[in-house]
Image: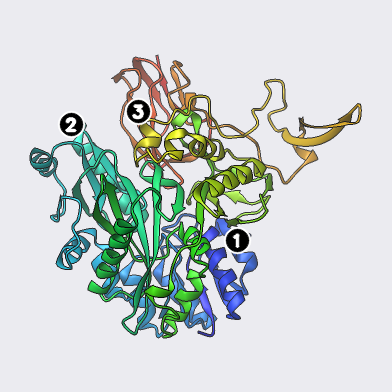
Amino acid sequence: MKKILVANRGEIAVRVLRACRELGIPSVAVYSELDREALHVRLADEAYALGGKTAAESYLRTDAILDIIAQSGADGVHPGYGFLSENADFAKAVSSAGVSFIGPPPEAIEIMGDKISARNAAEKVGVLSVPGITDAVTEPAQVEAFAQDHGYPVAVKAAYGGGGRGMRVIAEGDDIQAALTSAAREALSSFGRDELYLERYLPTPRHVEVQVLADAHGNCVYLGTRDCSAQRRHQKLVEEAPAPGISEEILAAMGEAAVKVALGCNYRNAGTVEFLYDSGDFYYLEMNTRLQVEHPVTEMVYNQDLVAHQIRISDGEPLPFTQADLSPAGHAFEIRINAEDPANGAFLPSPGTITSLRLPDGYGTRFDTGYEAGDTISPNYDNLIGKLVCWGADRETARKRTLRALSEMSVEGVATTIPADIAILEHPDFINLSHSTKWVEETLDLSGIEGAVLARPDSADPAAQPKTLDIEVEAKKFSVTVWLPSSADSTAARSRRASSGAALGGGGSGTVTVPMQGTVISVLVAEGDEVEEGQTLLILEAMKMENNINAGRAGVVKEVRVSEGDTVGSGDTVIIIE
C-alpha cells in the first residue's frame, strides 16, 4: 500500500500511525470537531475533518470517510477497533471504492459480526458455544422461556457488537423489559444496530481469548491466549498473556478451536476468538473481527508486530511463520488506564482536561496512549487514556513490574482507574488465580478507593487551578499542591471529582445532581411522583456507558429540570425531591 487512512481516533489511531511510519507508508488521519488538536492528528502525515462532535456525526459516517479516501488518495484503510471496524457495509464500501480494507473480508465480518450466525458457524466446525438461542430477542416472554430451560441469570447481548456494550445480565425478579430496552439502546448507540440474543450466563467463569492471524493463502495460526477476567460492567480492566493456571493441553485445544472457527468462515487478517473457561471446560463465546484493545500483551510475549502483519497480509503477503515457529516467552500484563473514578466500586466516568501526565518507563515497560498533557478527554467518546503493558520472565515478575510502573504514573485533571488497578494486582485472589469475570464487582472490596483528582478546598476560588510545587525544608525535598487563580495557568482545566454520593442524589439530599458530564437518555419520573430511596430517576450516558442517577432519599418529586436529549455538566442539579 502507498497510503493508509486510519478511520479511528485516540490510542489505536496512534498505534496504527506509528506502524505506518515504521513501514515507510504515508498516513492519513480523520478527526471530529472535538479532536481537531488530538495526538493522532498531530502525528499523521495528513489530516482531514469529518465534522460533528459525537461518534454518529463523525467517526461513524461512512460517506464522509469515503469522501476523504478519495480526496487523500489513500489506497488502504485501517479501521482500528470500535466504530466501523466490524461493520461489513463499511468494509464493502471501502473495497468497492478500489481501496484495501485492512481487516477480514466483509463476508467474514457478516458471519462473525452477527453473534447469532457466529454461534452457528462455530458449531458447524465442532466448536461448542455457551448454551443460547439464535432467534432475535425483543420480548420479555422470550427471556422467561429461556430461563425456564436454563435458569437465571440470563445474558442479553448485542448481536452486532462486543466489548460489553449492549450487554445486560438479568437475574430472577429483574425488570426484563427495562434490561432489553437499555441493551438495545446502548447497542444502537455503539454499533448502529440494536438486535439482541440470549445466552446462559455463567456466574464464575474466566474469560480467555485466542489471537489468530490468517493470510490470503490458506494459512492460519494462533498466537497464544490472553486472560481478560478482571472486568467491570463486562468491560476489561486487566489483561494478561498467556492465560495462567490452565494446562498446556487445554490452551492448545483452545488455539486449535480458534483456528477452526477462523478457517470455517474463510477468515483473513487479525482476529480474536473468545472463550469462557470453567472447571476444565471451555465454551466458544464470540469472534472479534478486528484488532483487540489488548493486542500488545500478545506482541510482548511473542515479539511480533500485529499491526505490521495486518498491513502485510492486506498487501497479499503470506504469513512469515508457521504454528511450529510460534511459542511465548515470559508473561505480560496490560492495564487499561481509563478516565474513570473507581468511586468505591461505582466506576464513574471522569471526562476533562489532562493537566499533567507523567508516564512510567523502564525495562519491559510500554505505554500506548492517544493523549498528552493539555489534551481533553471528551464525554462523547471512550474513556481510555492509555494502556500500560509490562513484560516479565514469569507472571510474578511481570506483576511486580506492573505495580512498579503504576506507582510511577501520575495523571492530573481527571480521575483514573489506577487505584483500582493496583487493588486488583495486589489482591490474593488475583495472585492465586481464584478470580472470575464477576470478581471485581462482587468480591473485590474497593471501599475508600477513588480516582486521584485533587479535591478543591472549600475556601478556594471556584476558578482556581491546582499546581504542584517542589520545596525544600532543612535540605529535604517535598512536593506540595497549591490552588492558584485560573489566570496563573490558562491551560489547566477545572479540577473536579465525580463522587459516588452525587450519583445517589447527594447522599440523602433531596437535591439530585449528576456526577459527570453526559447526555440524558431517559427520564423515568415526573413532577408529583412518589419515589423511594435508591430508585432510579433518570439514565445518563457518558463515555459510552449508561449510568443510573438514583434518589438519595424517599419523597415526592417537586421539580424535574431536564428532558431526554439534554446535555448536563458535572454537579448540575437535575431533580428536586421534597
| Placement of 474 over or under 30, stated as above or below | above
Q: Which element is circle 3 on?
A: strand
Q: Residue at x 39, y 62 (%)?
A: 224
Which amino acid type corresponds to the residue marked 3 in the rendered image?
Leu
Q: Is residue 169 left or right of residue 470?
A: left
Q: Are marks 2 and 3 in contact (CB under 8 Å)?
A: no
Query: From this viewpoint, is residue 192 visible?
Result: no
The way the protein has been coloured in the rendering is rainbow
Q: Is residue 471 left or right of residue 572?
A: right
- Gap between marks 2 and 1, in whole Å? 47 Å
Q: Which residue is mark 1?
A: 36
Q: Nearer the viewer, mark 2 or mark 3?
A: 2
Q: Which residue is mark 3?
A: 537
Give whichever of 272, 102 is nearer the camera.
Answer: 272
Q: Indicate the quadrant where residue 135 lies.
A: bottom left
| Placement of 577 over or under 491, stated as above or below | above
